[in-house]
């Protein structure tokens, strides 16, 4: 693919100064193992390739030194094995800001993210030591419908999700112009990267929301172990893998002006833990269609056994309820599959009887949201036993541009 080289003469100081000057003048449903798919820092090294949190790269390298390259055909943080911690930032353009301002901002932020991914401080970083351990840090940028309408990428246009009857969306968690997904295996590294990116985007955007999330810490379980969500369920048993022959077709866009990009769905799903706590284990398993202890379908014994939706018990009743989560979420066509990358969240809230708001920051990637994600979510909204204990309170969609080559910034090909 032909790429445009970075524009010479735009120093970081010039970008920051011009940004400040211009500002002054401008005055899816829950995913509990659903059957959605078949099968420069000192001493830093490439991060391991297995998916999931685990015990390290197997190379004897400390987890904190692992590096995920920032530059490449695709942005890191999509197909990259999920790190233990997430900060998802939703940003809105300030009044008067436009396409040229976005390009300046992305030059700055791409430079920040590239440097931070190696454990080197960003330029003008006054606390570079806080990020000296890259800990598999990835930074992924996406743009909402309003921003994509400013670009030349016809293949990257993205439309808001349709309304789903089970949603109880709150404006505070709604669509933003820009999203930044930051993931790392160390919360200090993550916090430092978030601070640097927010500092350098402040002249162009305002922060609408920050959604922090977590999985098991690296080293607690072996690489490839399917994570659990706050409701105790094994979450993500079936997910496309890069080794699948159709992975690229499912995840990466092939549009001429957006090739290598993808599309991102963000859903903030609250778990109604007070009433969930009142449900016994057999009823929980019936709602999902899987066992709690090992994630096996109710018709199997192992996590990765194929569910048998036709199997009946001695009374002639289906073993897996037709309204269970995995029955409703299973793909009806080969296109209804996408890459899920969810994180748990908990937020202290004294107004709730158990003292906290908890749930899932559900993130999904697909080559086509309308063809892959929407049909599944529509079925879940129509009928899903799990709807009794979960509700979507936030929703947004983003176009995630292709990765940047060394010397480029993310979005350079679509901002021109």
Image (spheres, helix red, strand yellow):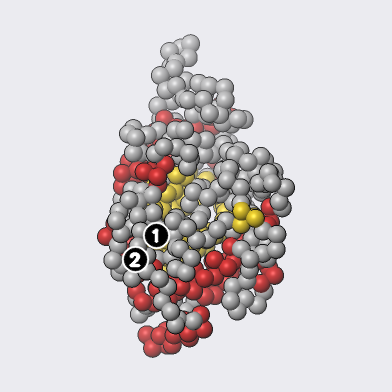
Residue 57 as seen in the image, left or right of residue 283: right
Question: How crowded is the residue under tag 1: few (<14 C-alpha within 10 Å), some, or many (20+)?
Answer: many
- Where residue 190 sits, quadrant-wise, is bottom right
Residue at point 63%, 68% (across, down) = 120
Outermost residue toward the left in this view: 154
Q: Which residue is mark 2?
A: 414
**Residue linked to disc 1:** 401
The image shows residue 351, relative to residue 316, as above or below, that is below
- The residue depicted at 55 percent of the width and 58 percent of the height is 69
Q: Residue at x 34, y 39 (%)?
A: 335
List x then y, in percent, for residue 24.
42, 88
CA gap between label 1 and label 2 equals 8 Å
Q: Is residue 187 left or right of residue 142?
A: right
Residue 212 coordinates in the image, percent (x, y): 56, 57
Badge 2 marks a residue whose secondary structure is helix
Along the viewing direction, whichever of 59 and 267 lies nearer the viewer: 59
Q: Residues within 10 Å of mark 2 (few under 14, many from 20)?
A: some
Quarter location, residue 101: bottom left
- Could you tell whether 83 is left or right of 163 in the image? right
The numbered mark at residue 338 is none
């Amino acid at each position: 693919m032909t790429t445009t080289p970075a524009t010479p003469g735009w120093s970081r100081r010039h970008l920051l100064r011009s940004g400040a000057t211009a500002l002054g003048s401008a005055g899816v449903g829950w995913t509990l193992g659903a059957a959605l798919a078949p099968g420069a820092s000192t001493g830093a090294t490439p991060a391991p390739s297995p998916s999931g949190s685990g015990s390290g790269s197997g190379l004897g390298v400390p987890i904190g030194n692992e590096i995920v390259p920032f530059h490449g055909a695709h942005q890191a943080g999509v197909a990259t094995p999920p790190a233990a911690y997430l900060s998802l930032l939703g940003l809105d353009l300030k009044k008067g800001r436009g396409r040229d301002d976005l390009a300046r901002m992305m030059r700055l932020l791409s430079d920040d993210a590239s440097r931070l991914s190696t454990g080197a401080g960003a330029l003008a970083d006054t606390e570079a030591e806080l990020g000296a351990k890259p800990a598999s840090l990835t930074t992924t940028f996406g743009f909402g419908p309003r921003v994509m309408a400013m670009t030349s990428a016809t293949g990257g246009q993205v439309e808001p999700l349709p309304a789903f009857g089970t949603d109880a969306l709150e404006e505070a968690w709604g669509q933003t112009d820009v999203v930044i997904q930051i993931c790392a295996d160390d919360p200090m590294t993550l916090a430092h990267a978030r601070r640097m990116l927010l500092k350098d985007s402040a002249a162009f955007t305002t922060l609408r929301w920050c959604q922090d999330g977590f999985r098991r810490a690296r080293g607690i379980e072996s690489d490839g172990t399917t994570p659990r969500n706050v409701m105790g369920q094994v979450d993500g048993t079936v997910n496309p893998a890069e080794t699948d022959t159709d992975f690229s077709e499912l995840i990466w866009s092939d549009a001429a002006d957006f090739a290598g990009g993808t599309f991102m769905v963000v859903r903030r799903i609250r778990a109604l833990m007070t009433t969930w706590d009142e449900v016994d284990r057999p009823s929980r398993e019936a709602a999902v269609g899987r066992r709690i202890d090992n994630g096996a379908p109710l018709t199997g014994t192992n996590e990765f056994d194929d569910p048998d939706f036709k199997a009946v018990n001695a009374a002639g009743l289906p073993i897996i309820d037709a309204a269970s989560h995995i029955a409703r979420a299973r793909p009806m066509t080969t296109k209804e599959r996408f890459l899920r990358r969810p994180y748990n969240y908990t937020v202290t809230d004294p107004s709730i009887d158990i003292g906290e708001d908890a749930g899932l920051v559900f993130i999904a990637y697909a080559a086509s949201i309308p063809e892959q994600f929407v049909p599944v979510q529509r079925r879940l909204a129509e009928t899903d036993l799990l709807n009794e204990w979960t509700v979507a309170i936030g929703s947004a969609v983003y176009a995630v541009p292709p990765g940047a080559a060394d010397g480029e910034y993310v979005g350079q090909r679509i901002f021109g």
